[in-house]
């Protein structure tokens, strides 16, 4: 019996070429080897398999009976090895039943998901997308241990993401939203004093009940008065409509909410860091073709969002790009 540990699997490529060509010189050309090198390989095959492999005949070299019996299984083994070492399995969105889990906020559901759903239903109707709540805690730990394909959120929330792949999707700016008849802010501008005088609504997953605005105010030694803390934006237009509450939120959402209720958009009277929507994923998915397809879908949608908003707003002066 042949000891597999001592058998050079590269010899299978040579065996296949020799049996197909039935000629040492042509087999050498096929494998980009010299004729002497291929003759040496044939000698090694004869020794390891204890069989002549090719023998002379009146019409040239012909395979032995054992060599012929080895051809079909050799081709099958090589094909299977190619499949195993292939960089990533082929992906056909039209037929795939892949399930993707995206951890993100309702802002992304609002700003990105409608176009993503439209694209998937048109191009990949059998794919399943599961949206789950945003990651709480260090992203690299959640992406390592939980069944999450992609996490999407603002970079200021994610912070440092060691050992994690990431990509910028689109810029966003924060604005204030309140009802048009807010007694504290009667005009279309707001001072820092008015901002601090107002009672605020906050959308936050933090147990401490603070957000990025509070972090920026704290650096100035200031604090706002937060009266309502909600986990999502779903009911905010109608709460704002009935109260003098002030809500800080991304411009894209504010622009839609003023179409739903008598509200007005105000600039935030403090300097804020750049808000950039980022996509994070674990390196194990970096070369996964299905995952690469999803990431490119998300990039394309966000690029179009940026272009459309810039066009609609004469350069999108409020957006950060």
Image (cartoon, helix red, strand yellow):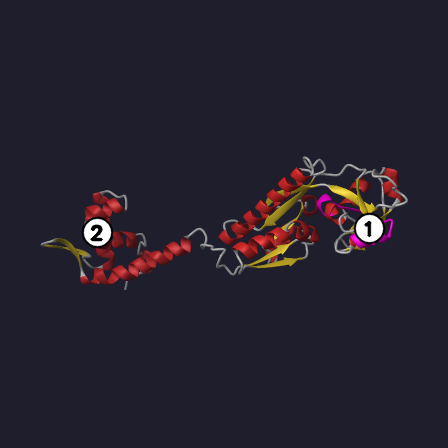
Please state which of residues 101 and 61 is positioned toward the viewer in this rendering. 101
Vertical arrangement, residue 98 with respect to residue 161, above or below? below
**Disc on the earlier residue, 1 or 2:** 2
CA neighbours of label 2 inside 10 A, class few (<14), some (14 to 19), many (20+)? some
Q: CA distance from mark 1 to mark 2?
A: 78 Å
**Residue tagged 1:** 201
Residue 204 visible in rendering: yes
Q: Which residues are magenta?
A: 237-253
Residue at (27% x, 61% y) in the render: 72
**Residue tagged 2:** 21
Mark 1 element type = strand
Residue 200 in the image: state x and y as whole percent: 84, 48
Quarter occupied by residue 239: bottom right
Vertical arrangement, residue 92 with respect to residue 266, above or below? below
Residue 121 in the image: state x and y as whole percent: 56, 57
Residue 297 in the image: state x and y as whole percent: 56, 49
């Amino acid at each position: 019996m042949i000891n597999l540990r001592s058998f050079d699997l590269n010899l299978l490529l040579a065996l296949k070429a020799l049996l197909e060509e039935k000629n040492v010189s042509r087999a050498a050309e096929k494998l980009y080897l010299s004729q002497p090198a291929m003759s040496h390989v044939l000698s090694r095959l004869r020794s390891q398999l204890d069989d002549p492999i090719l023998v002379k005949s009146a019409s040239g070299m012909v395979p032995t009976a054992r060599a012929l019996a080895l051809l079909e299984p050799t081709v099958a083994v090589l094909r299977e090895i190619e499949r195993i070492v292939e960089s990533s399995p082929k992906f056909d969105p039209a037929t795939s039943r892949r399930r993707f889990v995206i951890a993100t906020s309702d802002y992304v559901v609002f700003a990105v998901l409608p176009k993503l759903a439209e694209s998937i239903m048109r191009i990949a109707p059998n794919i399943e997308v599961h949206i789950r709540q945003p990651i709480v805690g260090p992203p690299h730990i959640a992406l390592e241990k939980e069944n999450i394909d992609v996490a999407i959120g603002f970079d200021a929330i994610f912070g440092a993401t060691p050992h994690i792949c990431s990509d910028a999707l689109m810029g966003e700016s924060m604005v204030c939203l309140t009802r048009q008849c807010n007694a504290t802010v009667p005009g279309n501008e707001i001072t820092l004093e008015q901002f601090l005088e107002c009672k605020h609504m906050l959308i936050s997953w933090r147990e401490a009940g603070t957000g990025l605005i509070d972090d920026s105010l704290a650096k100035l030694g200031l604090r706002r008065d937060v009266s309502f803390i909600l986990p999502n934006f779903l009911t905010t237009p109608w709460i704002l409509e009935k109260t003098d509450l002030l809500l800080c939120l991304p411009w894209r959402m504010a622009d839609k909410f003023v179409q739903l209720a008598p509200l007005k958009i105000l600039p935030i009277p403090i300097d804020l860091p750049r808000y950039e929507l980022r996509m994070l994923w674990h390196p194990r998915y970096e070369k996964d073709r299905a995952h690469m397809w999803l990431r490119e879908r998300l990039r394309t949608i966000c690029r179009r969002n940026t272009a459309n908003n810039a066009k609609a707003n004469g350069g999108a002066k409020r957006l950060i790009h």
